[in-house]
Amino acid sequence: MSTTSDRQLSAPTPVLDGPTPRPPRADVGRSRPARRSWRLSLRRDWQLYALAVLPVLFLVVFRYVPMLGNVIAFRQFRPGGSIFGEQWVGLRYVEMFIHDPTFWKVFWNTVILGGLTLVVCFPLPIVLALLLNEVRKKAFKRTIQSISYLPHFLSLVIVAGMVMQLLSLQGTVNQIIEGLGGEAIPFLQRAEWFRTIYVGSEVWQTVGWGTILYLAALTTVDASLYEAARIDGANRWQQTWHVTIPGIRPTMITLLILNIGTFLNVGFEKVLLLYNPLTYSTADVISTYLYRVGLVSNNLSYAAAIGLFQACIGLVMVLSANFISRRVVGASLW
């Protein structure tokens, strides 16, 4: 015999008209955290926002507002007139520098000098950081770091003055050459020596400072990876190649992309201080050419057109480097 409870269990489930009721949610009754408004954030962290005011103002005043001046690349600018030019001339100034052989000579000088600086100065901080990471005596390590950092804090005028004193006809370098039985070389008057002098001074001034970011990145590498590599029989070189370098790869890629973005912005101040008419054939770069054309010759529209062209090339190089890095390495800026 079937009991009343059995009949209730075997009874068919009634079909309800309309949508099926949803089961009760598990989080019913829980209080959701209220979304903090920007006013509350500003009131709570106003000290942090106050610290960002000056950097933001600097970027707006000296980086974004001057972009409005690029319009004079397409307008004829006359001193004393409107800051946005007097007359629309279209691509007249663009056609002028495209057909100017002097500009293309300066352009290739910039490419060669920027390429040499990138190839030589980019890997050296990585090498120095890896070497310092292997040093176990802290006193010796700090001494080397301090000595390598100091040139970064010197003014470019002081650096250029030191280079000129060392490489003059009566300078230290020529005194050593003459002491070895050779003849004095006018380094600063020969165009073929300028690129070596520039890149060498850049290495001396920037390599030590560039190791800071890599030494900071090395501290984030997991120590257990080194222990596992030693258990597998890896020596110091194999640990560096398979553990250390992959650990700092994102930092390397980021700095490489940023350096590529400034590829054509070869140091204006140092070149201006070191070059002379005898070395124009190898030393004259876009920035110094813009200075002579724009400020000295007072052709600001022509200089603005060249500067806009240079900025567009830099943007394309950054986007291309970031795209290639994201596809090949898997690390990128965005």
Image: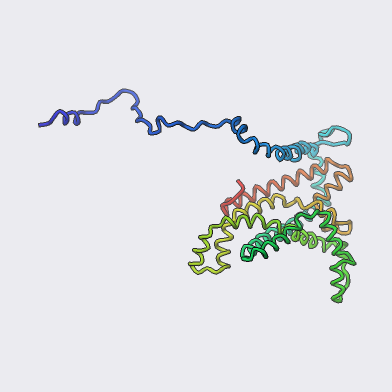
Residue drawn at x 83%, y 50% as measured from the top left: 288
Residue drawn at x 56%, y 67% as measured from the top left: 238
- Furthest-top residue in this view: 17
Residue 310 image point, x, y percent = 75, 47
Residue 154 image point, x, y percent = 79, 55
Q: Please give left or right for residue 183 compared with residue 254 in the image.
A: right
Q: Is residue 177 above or below residue 55?
A: below
Task: Say which quarter of the image contains residue 6.
Answer: top left
Q: Please give left or right for residue 262 compared with residue 27 in the image.
A: right
Q: Which residue is nearer to you in this view: 219 or 252?
A: 219
Residue drawn at x 69%, y 56% as measured from the top left: 210
Q: Please give left or right for residue 21 compared with residue 116 in the image.
A: left
Residue 71 image point, x, y percent = 78, 36
Residue 50 image point, x, y percent = 68, 36
Task: Say which quarter of the image contains residue 246.
Answer: bottom right
The quadrant of the image that shows the N terminus is top left
